[in-house]
Amino acid sequence: MEFIQYFSEVFTPVNLMILVFGTIGGLLLGATPGLSPTMAVALLIPFTFNMEPASSLIMLGAVYTSTVAGGAVSGILVNIPGAPANIATIMDGHPMARQGKATEALHYCFISSLVGGLIGIFLLIFFTPPLAELALKFGPAELFWISIFGITIIASLGGGSVIKGLISGCVGLWLSTIGYNPVLGEERFVFSEHLAGGIHVIAALIGLFAIPQVLTLVSTASFGKGKLAELRSHSVLRSFLYNIRRVKALTIGTIVGSIVGIIPGAGGQIAGLVAYDQTKKMSKDPSQFGKGEPDGVIAAESANNAMVGPSLVPLLTLGIPGSPTAAVLLGGLLINGLFPGPDLFTVHAAVTWTFIDSLLVGQVLMMVFGLTIARYSVFVTRIPNHVMAAAVIVLAIFGTYSVQNSISDVVVMMVLGTLMYFAARLGFSAAPLVLGLILGQLTETNFLQGRLIAGDDVWSYFLDGGISKLVIGLCFLSIGYSIHNERKQIIKRRREVEA
């Protein structure tokens, strides 16, 4: 096996040092709001110009894998996801932290990331050719229905109220239409110069999660020590044993993450949210989700990291990136004179297999350093509220501005965040709103592209494909199950009231 033949190359002093520092740096970058995996990899590409091809790819791969997991740190501790991929993680991760289980939540985050990540990389190693063929079958029609499937889970993310979840999701869908039409270039809902470029997902993400947190901290009567999250000591061994026993959550997360990773352009945020939703639906007690249920963290983080390996399958074989970060990695390949295709696994086999092997080792290092970070995260909880509020607002502004170097993004972030603060007091949740914004852009773009491709035969183009029919069926199942589950919860509450 070639991947075993080149395994020793990962442990040369230079490559191992690059892998260690890339993993640590990725965890720290991932924990910084606004610095998504895509941005972190893009920022590092210029530093790889004079490096050996294998070493440069090892660095980029290490940062890619570790930033995906690192974004959960700020999400769990201060309710601000480091990247869109970590939205689902905070839904149970932060409630666990507020119950004094932040260390436990961080343990589950990194252990489940290891499980999902390793399985994703093994899929990359052993099933690259058939998975590449599958990736080719996803066109605008299939991606349109996948995004519609994602929209069907919006209501279940509304923090207990289906109606409020749907309202938040619809607002998110509307926000996704602000700016210019992605295909035709027409201007829509631009009633301020700050909206000319539309609403960037990162600006919305930071605003909707960070600003309400800041305003909550400022509005507290006491400026004593922060009460964002308590950390009680928790055995890593106990966390590990508990985690690997959560077979259902790990299985759902890994399968969903692997499938979404193969689909070009889908991204980790869809993987995490779909895995979270399916785990919640299949749980014996769905009412515990959103209140600190460990399975929510385990499913979301295993999905995020299971996506990494499969997202590289279409990239390495066909030149089609499976995620936005994989698209940036394509630039790293081309800079080193490596072109996707069969030559990567024959002519440049040493570089390619060393890179893939480093991803395996990087997953283990990510867990080791992540668990170390979990031990020292207690310092976050000792920061006074007013200092924490100031630090978060600085990070929020820095993270938002750095995405496009645009002051308009900062204005949009502040306005959305302030409005979300008041909406949250009325029981509305930020998660369905962000999901609506993300999926709205994906849905509209693929629908318009599909309509242009189909010409006069739009219905048959969108309805005839085998994958399209399968996903349409899943959409109806998701809606039907949500309605059935909601009815069960209503009946259960009525019986409790009667009792």
Image (cartoon, helix red, strand yellow):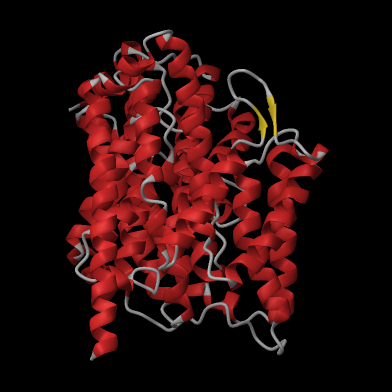
For the C terminus, which image quadrant? bottom left
Residue 209 horizontal/vertical position (percent): 59, 61
Residue 16 horizontal/vertical position (percent): 43, 43
Q: Can residue 71 be seen by looking at this rendering? A: no
Say which residue appears at 55% left-offset and 19% top-offset. Answer: 335
| Position above or below: 9 against 390 | above
Quarter of the image for residue 227 reads: bottom right
Which of 491 and 425 lies nearest the eye of the viewer? Answer: 491
| Left or right for 127, reference 236 | left
| Left or right for 93, reference 388 | left
Quarter of the image for residue 277 reads: bottom left
| Position above or below: 237 against 340 | below
Which of 238 and 14 lies nearest the eye of the viewer? Answer: 238
For the N terminus, which image quadrant? top left
Q: Can residue 144 be seen by looking at this rendering? A: yes
Which of 255 and 425 lies nearest the eye of the viewer? Answer: 425
Say which residue appears at 24% left-offset and 54% top-offset. Answer: 481
Residue 232 horizontal/vertical position (percent): 43, 84
Say which residue appears at 35% left-offset and 30% top-offset. Answer: 263
Residue 454 horizontal/vertical position (percent): 40, 11
| Left or right for 139, reference 251 | right
